[in-house]
Amino acid sequence: MSHGASGEGNMEPNLTPLLDVVLQLLMFFMMCVNFVTNQVSEEIVLPESMSAVPMDKNETDVLFVNVRPFILKDYESKGATALQKLTDKFKEGDPFIIILGEEPMRFSEFKFWLRNQFNTLKRTSKDGKVKTTIVMRAHKLTDYDQVYRVLQMCKIEGFRQIKLRAVTKSVAQPI
């Protein structure tokens, strides 16, 4: 059985169905992958801990709170206006809170913000209970008393599930 001329011409496969499948898979993975960009900040260098455990994948309602001291040299590359805003608000060594999507804030501002978050979460929950987990990421140069103050603020405002983040410390194996 012959189609067309005697074997002359280009025979190319139809790639349209293959491209359809590839694009559908790409969209599926883009929609289903749990992105962790909201917990990653280059401004926070986590401390090391041998007992650090990865985050549980079942935790879906999470609020990330980053704490660090203000160090001027870390922010010199941000630009003149951003640096001016920060130096007007913080002095060298002052602790501050970073929540992605929000302006850096002092502890007093954070307490007010946290109270508003708790009230909003309580109002929007079905049973009136807040099941949000606070994941605190403290920079390794942050003093423990500052970490403790943030933990206390979270507890006082009503958050009961609070976790600390750290980098797993690798232990050298004896040879």
Image (spheres, grey):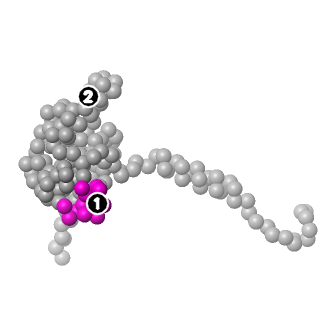
Question: Closer to the N terminus: mark 2 or mark 1?
Answer: 1
Element assignment for label 1: helix
On the picture, is 97 further left or further right than 127?
A: left
Residue 109 colored in magenta in the image: no
Please provide the residue range marked out in magenta: 72-84
- Residue depicted at x 59% and y 55%: 22
Q: Which residue is mark 2?
A: 119
Q: Which residue is mark 1?
A: 80
Disc 1 residue type (three-letter): Ala
Q: CA distance from mark 2 to mark 1?
A: 36 Å
Q: Position of residue 175 (x, y in %)?
A: 18, 76
Disc 2 residue type (three-letter): Asn
Compare residues 46 and 172 and report the one nearer the observer.
46
Q: Is residue 81 visible?
A: yes
Compare residues 45 and 102 and report the one nearer the observer.
102
Main secondary structure along the magenta-highlighted residues:
helix
Q: Quadrant of residue 166?
A: bottom left
